[in-house]
Image: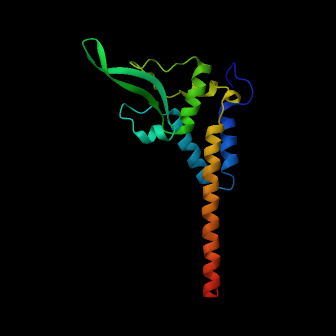
Amino acid sequence: MSEGITGMQSPSFIVDIITLYMYGMPAYQITEALTKIGNYLLTPCADDSLTSSMIATGRCVTVGTRCVEKLLGTCLQEKQVECCFASKLARIINEQGRPQLGIGWGTPKNPDCRGLTPEEFQSIDFSQVDLSEYIADLNVKSQATIDAEIGLSVADDINRIRTGG
């Protein structure tokens, strides 16, 4: 555990949350999910070709706006500069972890959209990170999965009754 961390150890806390919401999944699926999440957390921001879907799905942080076209010293067109990540969880951890680590986002003209290093990630005090936005998404997805499985089960039962089997 790095100096300055209070409470629980960062990676363990994330694993506990994910395990809680994935309870009942086969071990290989949990391992696969944790590997993907680890890759997402360490993946730097996307390049300049942002898509509206990344912004719409909550994977981006706005750094600011910059002028992209000037005429006689007057800005004719501004562009919003975003740092986007591979997942909402990566965005949340970067957004809330960077201030703890003293890492900024740079400027709109020169954004710092890199991902966190493993050492930086381990130095985050996760007791100070609000994951409620991410957990709310998991709850919605979990409920949708449960609803779909119940629907399939009921359809199977009805089919068995109709066919007499």
Where residue 17 appears, x then y in whole percent?
A: 68, 42
In the picture, the quarter occupied by the N terminus is: top right
The residue at the far left in this view is 72
Nearest to the observer: residue 151 or residue 105: 151
Point out the residue furthest to the top here: 73
Between 106 and 68, the residue placed more toward the observer is: 68
| Residue at the far bottom in the pictured view | 164
Residue 38 or residue 135, whichever sits in front: 135
Q: Quadrant of residue 94?
A: top right
Identify the image's colour scheme: rainbow, by chain, secondary structure or one colour. Answer: rainbow
**Left or right relative to 39: residue 97:** right
Give the image location of residue 81, x and y in percent: 41, 26
- Whether residue 139 is visible: yes
State left or right for residue 123 relative to residue 55.
right
Query: Above or below — where is 52 with respect to 69?
Result: below
Residue 74 vs 140, above or below: the answer is above
Residue that extends furthest to the right in the rendered view of this protein: 7
Image quadrant where residue 96 sits: top right
Task: Determine the residue positioned at 64% across, 70% down.
Answer: 153
Residue shown at the point (69%, 52%) measured from the top left = 23
Give the residue displayed 39% in from the left and 39% down from the top. Answer: 51
Q: Is residue 132 left or right of residue 90?
A: right
Q: Quadrant of residue 112?
A: top left
Q: Inspect this view and state whether residue 26 appears.
A: no
Q: Residue at x 56, y 48 (%)?
A: 32
Quadrant position of the C terminus in the picture? bottom right
Number of callouts in the render? 0
> Residue 34: horizontal and vertical position, in percent?
59, 44
